[in-house]
Image: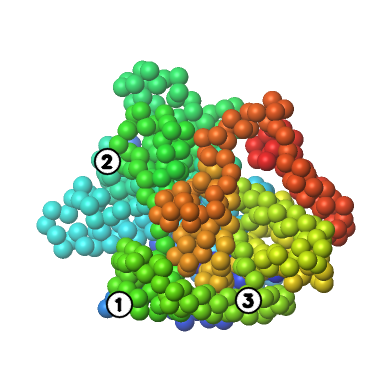
């Protein structure tokens, strides 16, 4: 239950500023605090071995996880389910009254302030050792509290049944690890089953393996979590013992059953014991421990099987599958686009499409009906006017609802290539400046919108945000061209902002280098709102293009299987840059958009080798 969320984004002269989110200061009427649901979570300490050889965590610091429930109503349901959030608390006996009365206020409440740190911010900066430790604490805190609660509920219900065996646990409980952040659920479930419930290793492992599954969300090497073994051993000594045992048994299994794979063990094992920096590879731990591993779009799942996890596939061919991401048409059409929803319902003569989207194919037979075209255009214009009002309120910029709305909204990241988009806008601006008045008359007026948060410590992403704003400041105030082009940065992108932008969009950009974006989901939301995509064959774009038809998708760029070859060619000096690309970069360097030095940002596109370089 993050008190300050991720951050609120403000745009100032220097670019993005982060300020703490205040969602809880205004009081949150939906949440129900559950003072009856509290679990202890232990950090640090040591492992105690009893005479019978059983092991237990002891000492260290113990915080309490306090449950909050937020009811989630469904669509046309008679009930609600709850979203369980955890808050970290220290207990009264951890408050040192003697120290406090002696004027030592900070040290008297040390554990209380450590508890607050855990639930202060989502994704705290991890450039420092303190930051890394806090992230690991957050991950473990959430895993441990949730698993203790799951086990408590299982046992509570077990007493109603006769058999009540742990072997039934996987048929009642599924733990889906969404990315590698909850990987610690694996050793923690093992610890709870063995140390608290008295199961032996083999039985605990069988239950854990059948309960846990893993969804991979990225193939970017820097995003695959690797935690320092020494940090893990210090913070979670018992869990680290269990991880070491999982690794040892995996190695033994491979050596005894797959002699041919022995040479691959160093890259496949859970522990990377390189003397420079021994780490725990969380993705490997997930793959070794889970009963099923999935990617989130067909292309991505194939890359997992053929590249990232190829060695594991030969051991467990049935473990890997695809589950293409999805979105809810209730929020992303029915709710956010009432005008278009009414038209769809009217022409289909049913609103059942909200829970069975295949019914939309029933609109195909009206595709050439001009009455539908007119209604559709009117609905789009209403959404564009709503969007124009939002832009005016949020930025002070007036945009023309009859211009083409060209939108890219997503987290700011080099692989998502917002930089390519803005270079395109810069080139468009330069060409407009060179045109005669007559030539300009033939141009379709366009409003380019970019939105998204840059991670607080991600320098190049923050430079991209600043560049978009600097370009907008010049273009939007240039009377020669601002009838034909505007460039707007939409601040503080979030779901509520997306609900206004997506219905009003006509062209949306999903332009990552093929093989980089695992799936993407806003591409689906834009498509559902009658917007055309310009994009690469990446993530779910591939499947969207199959659904909407090649004629209804603006495709460009290399295919995923061509990228490695192109990088190789570039390293061998065979790359010839497009002169327009050079022209756009030069225009920025010339100071047209202000005095800020964009050299380091533009340099990131140059140089012939290195990950992410050499665009």
Residue identified by numbered label 3: 401
Q: Nearer the viewer, residue 191 or 391?
A: 391
Asked if residue 468 lies left or right of residue 434, the reply is left
**Residue projecting furthest to the left:** 162
Q: Residue at x 80, y 57 (%)?
A: 430
Q: Nearer the viewer, residue 374 or 332?
A: 374
| Residue 546: x %, y % from top left | 41, 50
Residue identified by numbered label 1: 349
Q: Earlier in the sequence, mark 1 or mark 2?
A: 2
Q: CA distance from mark 3 to mark 1?
A: 30 Å
Neighbours of disc 2 within 10 Å: few (<14), some (14-19), many (20+): some
Residue identified by numbered label 2: 206
What's the coloring here? Answer: rainbow
| Residue 556: x %, y % from top left | 57, 47
Asked if residue 212 lies left or right of residue 266, the reply is left
Question: Of circles 2 and 3, which is in front?
Answer: 3
Q: Residue at x 45, y 19 (%)?
A: 263
Dots 2 and 3: beta carbons under 8 Å?
A: no
| Residue 258: x %, y % from top left | 34, 21
Label 1 sits on a secondary structure element that is: loop
């Amino acid at each position: 239950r993050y008190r300050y969320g991720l951050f609120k984004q403000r745009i100032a002269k220097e670019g993005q500023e982060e300020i703490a989110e205040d969602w809880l200061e205004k009081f949150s009427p939906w949440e129900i605090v559950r003072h009856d649901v509290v679990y202890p979570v232990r950090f640090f300490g040591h492992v105690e071995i009893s005479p019978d050889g059983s092991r237990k965590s002891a000492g260290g610091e113990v915080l309490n996880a306090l449950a909050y429930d937020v009811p989630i109503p469904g669509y046309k349901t008679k009930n609600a389910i709850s979203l369980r959030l955890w808050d970290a608390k220290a207990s009264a006996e951890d408050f040192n009254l003697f120290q406090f009365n002696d004027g030592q206020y900070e040290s008297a409440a040390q554990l209380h302030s450590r508890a607050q740190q855990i639930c202060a911010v989502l994704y705290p900066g991890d450039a420092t050792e303190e930051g890394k430790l806090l992230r690991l604490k957050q991950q473990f805190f959430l895993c441990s509290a949730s698993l203790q609660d799951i086990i408590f509920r299982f046992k509570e219900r077990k007493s109603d049944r006769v058999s009540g065996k742990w072997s039934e646990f996987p048929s009642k409980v599924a733990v889906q690890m969404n990315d590698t952040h909850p990987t610690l659920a694996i050793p923690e479930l093992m610890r709870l089953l063995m140390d608290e419930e008295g199961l032996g290793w083999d039985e605990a492992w069988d239950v854990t393996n059948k309960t846990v599954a893993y969804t991979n969300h990225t193939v970017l090497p820097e995003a695959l979590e690797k935690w320092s073994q020494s940090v893990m051993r210090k913070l979670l000594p018992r869990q680290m013992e269990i991880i070491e045992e999982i690794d040892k048994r995996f190695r033994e299994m491979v050596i005894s059953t797959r002699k041919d794979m022995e040479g691959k063990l160093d890259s496949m094992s859970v522990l990377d014991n390189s003397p420079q920096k021994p780490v725990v590879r969380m993705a490997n731990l997930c793959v070794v421990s889970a009963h099923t591993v999935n990617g989130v779009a067909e292309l991505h799942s194939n890359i997992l099987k053929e590249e990232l996890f190829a060695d594991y596939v030969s051991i467990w061919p049935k473990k890997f599958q695809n589950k293409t991401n999805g979105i809810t048409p209730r929020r992303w059409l029915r709710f956010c686009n009432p005008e278009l929803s009414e038209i769809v319902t009217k022409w289909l003569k049913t609103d059942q499409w909200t829970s069975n989207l295949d019914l939309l194919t029933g609109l195909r037979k009206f595709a050439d009906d001009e009455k539908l075209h007119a209604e559709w255009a009117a609905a789009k214009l209403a959404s564009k006017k709503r969007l124009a009002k939002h832009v005016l309120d949020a930025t002070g910029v007036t945009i023309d609802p009859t211009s083409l709305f060209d939108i890219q909204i997503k987290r700011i990241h080099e692989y998502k290539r917002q930089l390519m988009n803005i270079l395109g806008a810069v080139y468009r601006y330069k060409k407009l400046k060179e045109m005669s008045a007559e030539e300009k008359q033939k141009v379709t007026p366009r409003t380019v919108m970019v939105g998204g948060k840059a991670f607080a410590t991600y320098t190049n992403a923050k430079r991209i945000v600043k560049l978009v704003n600097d370009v907008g400041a010049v273009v939007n105030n240039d009377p020669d061209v601002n009838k034909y082009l505007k460039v707007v940065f939409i601040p503080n992108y979030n779901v509520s902002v997306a609900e206004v932008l997506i219905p009003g969009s006509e062209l949306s950009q999903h332009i990552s280098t093929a093989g980089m974006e695992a799936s993407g989901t806003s591409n689906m939301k834009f498509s559902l709102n009658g917007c055309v995509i310009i994009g690469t064959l990446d993530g779910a774009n591939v499947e969207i293009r199959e659904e909407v038809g090649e004629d209804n998708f603006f495709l460009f760029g290399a295919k995923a299987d061509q990228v490695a070859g192109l990088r190789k060619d570039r390293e061998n000096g065979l790359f010839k840059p497009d002169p327009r690309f050079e022209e756009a970069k030069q225009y920025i360097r010339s100071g047209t958009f202000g005095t800020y030095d964009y050299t380091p940002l533009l340099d990131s596109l140059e140089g012939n080798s290195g990950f992410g370089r050499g665009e």
